[in-house]
Image (cartoon, helix red, strand yellow):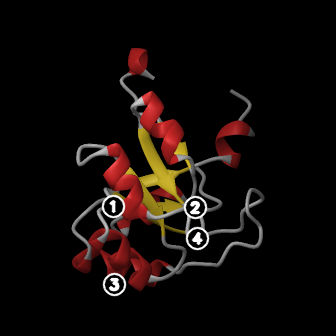
Amino acid sequence: CERHGAQLIVNDDAELAARLGVGLHLGQTDGSLSAARALLGRQAIIGATCHAQLELAEQAVAEGASYVAFGRFFNSSTKPGAPAASVELLDQARPRLHLPITAIGGISLDTAPGLIARGVDLVAVIHALFAAAS
């Protein structure tokens, strides 16, 4: 990551993120965001999954999140049963949240531009990246 100027963000494991000195992403059942913030410090990047609920995002902001993630926006083979989020949620979230918003779930080169046009700052891509030919 250092060689490419990329930030590493560990999923779900605050203790590992603390040992490595990297960022952390927490799902709704992965532990307390407040506790992770206390462990990692004020400067650490900590994100929170908010599925399709603006209220969860507002709670994450209050607990010290650096960014929030909404989704799944499209069908996803990675998490097929994940709750669906609508692009209208982004319209509601953008004026109320003053931190980066991430979209996740079935995102590809074809679907990312529409989400970015709706105010998404970051996209999380898994399947389209690993399934790409090159």
Q: Which residue is mark 3?
A: 92
Labels 1 & 4 near each other (Cβ < 8 A) = no
| Residue 11 percent location from the top left of the image | 56, 47
- Check disc 1 and give the amino acid type: Ala
Mark in front: 1 vs 2: 2
| Residue 117 percent location from the top left of the image | 36, 64
Badge number at residue 30: 2
* Nearer-N-terminus badge (4/3): 4
* Nearer-N-terminus badge (4/2): 2
Tell me where residue 73 sits by quadrant: bottom right
From this viewpoint, is residue 8 visible? yes
Q: Nearer the viewer, residue 8 or 93?
A: 8
Q: Quadrant of the N terminus?
A: top left
- Check disc 2 and give the amino acid type: Asp
Mark in front: 4 vs 2: 2
Q: Nearer the viewer, residue 131 or 5?
A: 5
Q: Which residue is mark 4?
A: 73
Tell me where residue 94 sits by quadrant: bottom left
Q: Which residue is mark 1?
A: 65
Q: CA distance from mark 1 to mark 4?
A: 21 Å
Q: CA distance from mark 4 to mark 3?
A: 15 Å
- Check disc 4 and give the amino acid type: Phe
Q: CA distance from mark 2 to mark 3?
A: 26 Å
Q: Nearer the viewer, residue 60 or 88?
A: 60
Q: Is residue 106 left or right of residue 38?
A: right
Under circle 4, the secondary element is: loop
